[in-house]
Image (tube, rainbow, N blue to C red):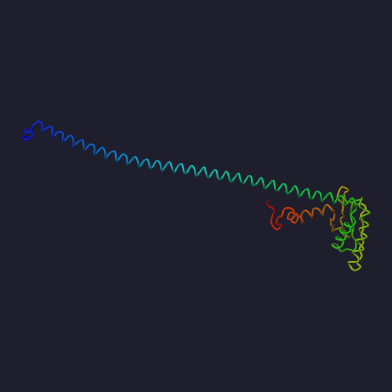
């Protein structure tokens, strides 16, 4: 205490200024530490927020990109299916027209008699049945042509079968419909076996049996695979 009382006013002021400067310096250092700590924490939080927001934006973008890709794929698939159906429809329309024209030509052939064709149909039935007697049915308008064709077929059958004869009867009661394309049906002697060699029936068989070849010729399709397009 005696030393303090012994200090002059100038000395006291000097000591006070030193203490004040020291305290100020300590305060500034502490303030800088606090500021650095605050900046560091702010930077960390900011980085977290930036990463979180970036991840959210990336996820949202990926989701929208995936949705856009799916939508594009669906659109492409829909267009492809529509194109496939249009192509299928066009092909079927062409085939229907082709067989329709064939049916008209058969009808015209039937109107003109088509004796050579009738002979071939009768012979086919004779060889298949291999019987002593058969009965033919035809349209009434084809009666004369069928009888002539039957005589020719009978002679050829006998020659090819080494003299085996066959009786051919043309049914004058049970006729084929006049609206049909013509041709014949052949029944064996007991009436239990019937071969349908009408033009309409042969065309139906052609549509089934020759369809793969027709598709190959028209569209270049492989007949060994199922039609897909």
Please say if 104 is above or below 135: above
Please say if 37 is above or below 150: above
What's the residue at 81%, 53% (across, down)?
A: 203
Residue 135: image location, x then y, percent = 90, 57
Residue 221: image location, x then y, percent = 71, 55
Q: Residue furthest top?
A: 9
Please say if 6 is above or below 219: above
For residue 95, side relative to residue 1 (left or right): right
Residue 105: image location, x then y, percent = 84, 50
Q: How many marks overall?
A: 0
Q: Which residue lies furthest to the bottom in this view?
A: 162
For residue 80, side relative to residue 145 (left or right): left
Q: Which quadrant is the N terminus positioned in?
A: top left
Residue 217: image location, x then y, percent = 75, 55
What's the residue at 55%, 43% (across, down)?
A: 68
Foreground residue, 105 or 208?
Answer: 105
What's the residue at 75%, 56% (across, down)?
A: 213
Q: Quadrant of residue 189?
A: bottom right
Foreground residue, 209 or 171?
Answer: 209
Foreground residue, 180 or 4?
Answer: 4
For residue 44, side relative to residue 98 (left or right): left
Q: Quadrant of residue 164?
A: bottom right
For residue 195, side relative to residue 64 (left or right): right
Q: Quadrant of residue 206?
A: bottom right
């Amino acid at each position: 205490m005696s030393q303090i009382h012994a200090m002059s006013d100038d000395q006291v002021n000097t000591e006070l200024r030193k203490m004040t400067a020291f305290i100020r310096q300590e305060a500034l250092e502490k303030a800088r530490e606090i500021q650095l700590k605050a900046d560091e924490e702010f930077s960390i939080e900011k980085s977290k927020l930036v990463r979180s927001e970036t991840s959210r934006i990336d996820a949202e973008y990926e989701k929208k990109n995936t949705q856009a890709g799916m939508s594009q794929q669906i659109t492409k698939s829909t267009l492809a299916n529509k194109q496939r159906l249009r192509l299928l429809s066009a092909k079927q329309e062409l085939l229907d027209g082709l067989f329709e024209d064939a049916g008209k030509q058969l009808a015209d052939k039937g109107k003109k008699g088509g004796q050579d064709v009738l002979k071939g149909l009768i012979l086919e039935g004779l060889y298949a049945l291999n019987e002593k007697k058969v009965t033919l049915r035809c349209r009434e308008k084809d009666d004369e042509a069928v009888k002539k064709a039957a005589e020719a077929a009978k002679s050829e059958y006998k020659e090819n079968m080494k003299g085996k004869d066959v009786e051919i009867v043309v049914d004058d009661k049970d006729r084929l419909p006049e609206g049909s394309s013509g041709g014949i049906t052949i029944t064996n002697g007991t009436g239990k076996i019937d071969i349908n060699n009408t033009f309409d029936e042969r065309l139906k068989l052609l549509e089934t049996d020759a369809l793969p070849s027709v598709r190959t010729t028209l569209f270049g399709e492989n007949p060994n695979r199922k039609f897909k397009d």
